[in-house]
Image (cartoon, rainbow, N blue to C red):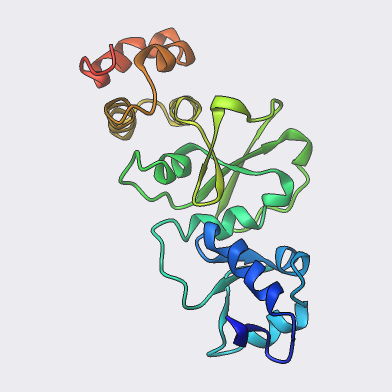
Amino acid sequence: MANLVGDTSDIGAVDRLYALAEPQSGYFTAQQAIGVGVPRATLTYHARGGGMLQRAGRGVYRLRRFPGSSHEHVVPAWLRLSRAAAVVSHISAMELLDLTDVIADEVHVTMPRSKRGTTIPDGVRAHFTDRPIEGRDRRQVSGVPVTGVERTITDVVRGDGWTEQVDLAVRQSLSRGMTTLPRLSERLPKSWQARLRGAAGGIGS
């Protein structure tokens, strides 16, 4: 990684940059890089054709030789809104939690209602909440904050209704011990309880 900074002698900063990008599927923001001592000019230089960095959106970079990830379309979208306390949610959270085989056309995130004025990048759908997403409602996947299983399934059902993908998510999450039937039941409206029991098929009851 020493070649990343060219004439910059602070190799320690490069090591910190790699440590920063590694849990984020190889991605980082310019602000994060500056925070670990890598100048913006260095990023610009190495993001040229054939350089060690790839631009992945405004202010977002990827280490070019970092192994690919099945989540790499989600991570850069979230990074652009990470300073606005965005959390990956809805069908995109199902994807990161490996509860669906669908890749959504948009990356879904949930943000505090106080951030409604934030510019939302193309390809991102923002939802807003008055309550912080904390505790059991929040997980980390590939260095990205993601809504927890119960919150994710509930968000999808409330937004799009009950679908076959929800059936799959219920079965997957129960069979893998990620949640329990009572925990799902307490979050879903009464009108969906029968469908929940049918999807569970006796798992977790």
Q: Residue 93, how many percent across, how many down?
A: 47, 41
In the displayed structure, 189 sits above or below 34; it is above
Q: Quadrant of the C terminus?
A: top left
Q: Residue 144, how many percent across, how many down?
A: 56, 48
Position of 33 with respect to 166 (left or right) is right
**Residue lying furthest left:** 201
**Residue sitting at 63 percent across and 85 percent down?**
46
Q: Nearer the viewer, residue 193 or 88?
A: 88
In the displayed structure, 67 sits above or below 143; it is below
Position of 173 with respect to 122 (left or right) is left
Which of the 4 quarters of the picture holds residue 203?
A: top left
**Residue lying furthest top:** 190
**Residue sitting at 57 percent across and 60 percent down?**
76
**Residue sitting at 21 percent across and 14 percent down?**
202
Q: Nearer the viewer, residue 13 or 188?
A: 13
Q: Residue 170, how many percent across, how many down?
A: 32, 26
Position of 79 with respect to 107 (left or right) is right
Q: Quadrant of the N terminus?
A: bottom right
**Residue lying furthest front:** 12
Is any atom of residue 47 visible in this view?
Answer: no
Which of the 4 quarters of the picture holds residue 115?
A: top right
Q: Residue 175, how many percent across, how many down?
A: 26, 27
Count every numbered label the image shows and give the total: 0
Which of the 4 quarters of the picture holds residue 61?
A: bottom right
In the displayed structure, 148 sits above or below 54; it is above
